[in-house]
Amino acid sequence: MALESLRAHKMRAFLTLIGVVIGVSTIITMMTVLGGIKYTIDDAMRNALGVNVFQVQKDEQQTGFTIGRRRHEWRPRIEARYADAIRDRCPSVRAVGAETWTGGRTFVRGGIESDPNQQVAGGTIEFGENNSMYIARGRPITYQDVLSARRVIVIGNDPYEQLFKYMDPIGQNIRIDGQQFEVIGVFEERGSLLGNSQDSYSWIPLSTFERIWGDWRDINLTIQAYSADVYESAQQEVIEALRVERGLMPGQPNNFGLWTPDLLQYQFNQQTGWIGVAAFGICGVSLLVAGIGIMNIMLVSVTERTREIGIRKALGGTRTSILRQFLIEAIMLSEVGGAIGIFLGYGVAIAINQNLNFPAPVPVWAVFLAVIFCSVVGIGFGMWPAIKAARLDPIEALRHE
Amino acid sequence: MSNFSNNHRALIEIRGMKKIYDLGSVQVNALNGVDVDIHENEYVSIMGPSGSGKSTLMNLIGCLDTPSTGEYYLANERVAGLSDAKLAEIRNRRIGFVFQTFNLLPRASALQNVELPLVYAGESPSQRRRRAKEALEAVGLTDRMKHKPNELSGGQRQRVAVARALVTNPSIILADEPTGNLDSKTGAEIMELLDRIHNEGNTIVLVTHEEEIAQHSQRIIRLLDGKIESDRRTTSV
Ligand SMILES: Nc1ncnc2c1ncn2[C@@H]1O[C@H](COP(=O)(O)OP(=O)(O)O)[C@@H](O)[C@H]1O
Ligand SMILES: [Mg+2]
């Protein structure tokens, strides 16, 4: 009985349900995507920097969104030699890695070329551990490689597959910018993050890097403290050591930035927080649209069925039972829109999953949230029409044409 | 038993009943002081010209309406001041309405229409089905249960309405011009049905314009301008 009016006026019902559908599919999609991004980034963050690790870079770590380009005073670059200074003077520091990057390179082997998006890191021996990149075959860069600036390279899985499919690459030579390198290792396959391949990163000794591509690039220092207990003091020691190295007077501000995973996490949460707020905004607006739609269709329904209400009252229907009947209809109507919205949102989420390739199952609680959302809309906006129906005078209602 | 004499013995006892519609500039006295007793298993016709207050009286007897002044006792119970839920229960259990325009739910089948009062009586679905089928059989519609009202003739629709009025076993059947929309042959069939219901022990109050129809009853109350003009036993039957 409850869904009869819905069935009788399919088109009208559908139009009024669009608000519910949009609201619910937004909830589902947003929650799924947010969950997926968070999962991916958490995962990446766990892997990106090892335990008790922080970084030194030329610029400050940013938090929140920055509109446009951030203005910066000129700062001297971070140099590889700071690593030695930190090793010498910071007792809480267990290891210091130095690395620098260049991108957009093409690897060549014989007549075969890799894709042109290869990233090459010049790094010290700590590079692999600091970046959570593990060797699948061959060996990593050693202290000797760095000391003698050897032309050796550990390649990512992408260039390995593109240049060496079905072949043992160890001991083979490749060329980058005309320079020859001997492949000594291959990194484990890492998949992709938010649509970007994580397997286009290769590693050569920092000393070799600076000899070939110059020593003007900024260096990232990745520093590991002995333990969580001395993590803070390690940061203080590093700041002191760098101030001395960079010749800062007391009272002058630091001209370098410390980057910590906490801050990265905070930054991420802030940005996704805004997505959440936007999602709730969209939901709020669709709630209003949905509610007005429901209220409208229910008011029309009450008017059209005035005589029915009179009949029901004459046969023993109480005000309460009429109120309940119309409220349930409003809720059912809303839930039908909700069901469509759940399927739609689910479809969008799956499409996003497949295209961006991150694992984001639709969270069960988002479905619950959607059902609650629909009930709230149904009850909230169905109440007034239902009260109107319940209050009808039976005789007037029976006389209604 | 001194108390007993104070009890109201008629099933329906109406005293000084007025129903006034205030239309702002004018007041319409739909009922203007009506006293009437109707006893258990009586068969009463209400007659009178259009606008004389017949339907208003029926609606008051059926607890669909409340009087402006006056008292109404139904089976010794004072109706004034009863709650909406209690009035609904009286309509459901004690009273069966039959309307001139049938008043069936257009989208529900004959069976579903007859089941409706049992829904409000709180019967289980299987009981509902069984009793509604029995009621439809009693009015001779065994083979029309699944039909919607627009698939039935006028006479058949009124039979469904009678079945619906009977299904909760009420003691009072209120029929407001039940044959008004029917041709004389089907009208006669409906009257046969009402006679049978009366013979089974029910009380019937019937509004009609036609003397011939009124002759089915035992008593004719004539209304004029909201007042009882005459109240007589019929000669025949
Ligand atoms: N809701 C109403 N508002 C105003 N006047 C009404 C209303 N209902 C009935 N009346 C008036 O009350 C009088 C009696 O009506 P009714 O009982 O329907 O007469 P009958 O059934 O005998 O034709 C009529 O004059 C009618 O116009
Ligand atoms: Mg009338």
Image (cartoon, coloured by chain):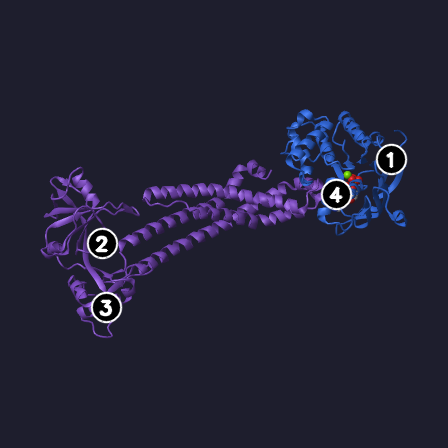
Chain colours: A purple, B blue
Alpha-carbon distance for marks 1 and 4?
25 Å
Q: Disc 3 residue type?
A: Glu
Between disc 4 and disc 3, the foreground one is: 3
What residue does disc 3 label? A237
Question: Assess mark 1: CB under 8 A from ligand 1?
Answer: no
Question: In the image, residue A11 lies at what x, y percent?
Answer: 52, 38
Neighbor class of circle 3 (other Cα within 10 Å; few <14, some 14-19, many 20+) is some
On residue A129, the disc is 2
B132 to the left or right of A372: right
Between disc 1 and disc 3, the foreground one is: 3
| Chain on which label 4 sits | B
- Viewer-nearest residue: A294 or A260: A260
Where disc 2 sits, the SS reads: helix
A226 to the left or right of B41: left
Using the rendered image of the protein, determine whether residue B136 is visible from the camera's viewpoint: yes
Alpha-carbon distance for marks 2 and 4?
84 Å
What residue does disc 1 label? B219
A390 to the left or right of A346: right
Where disc 4 sits, the SS reads: helix
Where disc 1 sits, the SS reads: strand
* Residue under disc 1 on the same chain as residue under disc 3: no
